[in-house]
């Protein structure tokens, strides 16, 4: 009666087996094994920190497990995902928690909700499968033939998710005018967020929970990444007390907070918010220098 389902299932199993770095900007992070060293945060970290330039201090490499301001603000959903991603016996792990005002914010209409529970991470049951059909069934919304046509052995687009979780963007602009338009669109979106969102005490509490959990598995450091002067001004108007709050959280948890936000003009950005690839490499090297003493066994 349902014999026709067999070839359909077989076809999807076949197509799904080709999923990889070109599939989308998230999939590959759910196909890697459990990790001991994690980079956490939103898209600023996903694009800006390149694990290959972070020196391993405990025999393990860093893995970038960062997503977006909508998918991975600090909350119960992100914490559960991180708990699934860590090797359970890890005791000397190194954990970089990147922070910015948006990672601890909610819509002003409900500062206590966690809408990401209904999003990508909230839908997942399995975080370390390869292939991960759980992810493809719940979060991949294109034709699965697209997976095959953009398979890694054949295609590398403008966005590519590397094996270490770093989201690589290979984007060029035809003119300065086109670049400035891209920057203004991004800045405009954050100006809108600043009107609609506010720092949430619930998110702050969840950040403390994340730190406490990770401290049981190793050393933790809070890092605020650089951003353009224009973006930094937006954030300073939005949450002028943010750095002081992060320092307070770091002190109360016995961890370190490093702020790179005032070094923004030393780097280039795709849109005023996300580091351009070459600048991301240079920033990661700078971050690595700061980590060596703190993460030293």
Image (tube, rainbow, N blue to C red):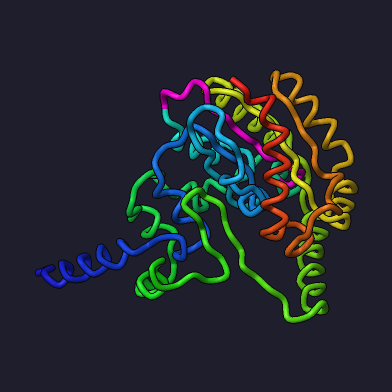
Residue 144 vs 78, above or below: the answer is below
**Residue 278, x across and y down, in percent:** 69, 58
Residue 289 vs 14, above or below: the answer is above
**Residue 254, x across and y down, in percent:** 70, 18
Q: Classify residue 87 as left or right of residue 284.
A: left
Exactly how many numbered labels are in the figure?
A: 0
Magenta residues (range): 88-102
- Residue drawn where x is 57% and y is 29% of the image: 94
**Residue 210, x across and y down, in percent:** 60, 30
Q: Classify residue 200 as left or right of residue 120.
A: right
- Residue drawn where x is 77% and y is 50% of the image: 197
- Residue drawn where x is 78% and y is 80% of the image: 175
Q: Is residue 186 magenta?
A: no
Residue 67 vs 87, above or below: the answer is below
Q: Name the image quarter holding the C terminus.
A: top right
Residue 169 vs 194, above or below: the answer is below
In front of the other: 72 or 107: 72
Q: Name the image quarter holding the N terminus.
A: bottom left
**Residue 68, x across and y down, in percent:** 62, 52
In front of the other: 84 or 283: 283
Q: Classify residue 199 as left or right of residue 56.
A: right
In front of the other: 103 or 23: 23
- Residue drawn where x is 78% and y is 31% of the image: 246
């Amino acid at each position: 009666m349902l014999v026709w389902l067999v070839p359909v299932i077989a076809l999807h199993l076949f197509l799904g087996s080709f999923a990889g770095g070109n599939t989308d900007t998230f999939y590959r992070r759910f196909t890697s094994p459990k990790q001991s060293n994690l980079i956490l945060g939103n898209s600023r970290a996903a694009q800006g920190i390149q694990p290959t330039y972070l020196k391993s201090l405990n025999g393990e490499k860093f893995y970038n497990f960062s997503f977006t301001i909508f998918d991975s603000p600090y909350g119960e959903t992100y914490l559960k995902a991180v708990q699934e991603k860590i090797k359970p016996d890890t005791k000397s792990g190194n954990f970089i928690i990147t922070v910015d005002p948006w990672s601890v914010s909610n819509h002003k209409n409900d500062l206590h909700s966690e809408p990401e529970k209904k999003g990508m991470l909230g839908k997942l049951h399995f975080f370390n499968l390869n292939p991960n059909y759980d992810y493809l069934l719940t979060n991949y919304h294109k034709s699965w033939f697209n997976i095959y046509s953009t398979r890694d052995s054949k295609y590398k687009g403008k966005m590519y998710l590397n094996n270490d979780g770093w989201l690589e963007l290979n984007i060029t602009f035809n003119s300065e005018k086109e670049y400035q338009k891209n920057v203004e669109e991004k800045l405009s979106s954050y100006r809108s967020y600043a009107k609609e969102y506010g720092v949430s005490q619930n998110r702050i509490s969840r950040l403390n929970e994340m730190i406490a959990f990770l401290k049981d598995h190793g050393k933790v450091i809070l890092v605020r990444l650089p951003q353009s002067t224009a973006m930094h001004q937006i954030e300073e108007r939005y949450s002028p007390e943010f750095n002081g709050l992060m320092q307070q959280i770091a002190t109360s948890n016995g961890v370190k907070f490093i702020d790179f936000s005032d070094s923004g003009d030393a780097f280039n950005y795709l849109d005023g918010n996300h580091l351009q690839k070459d600048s991301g490499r240079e920033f990661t090297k700078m971050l690595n220098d700061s980590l060596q003493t703190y993460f030293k066994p």
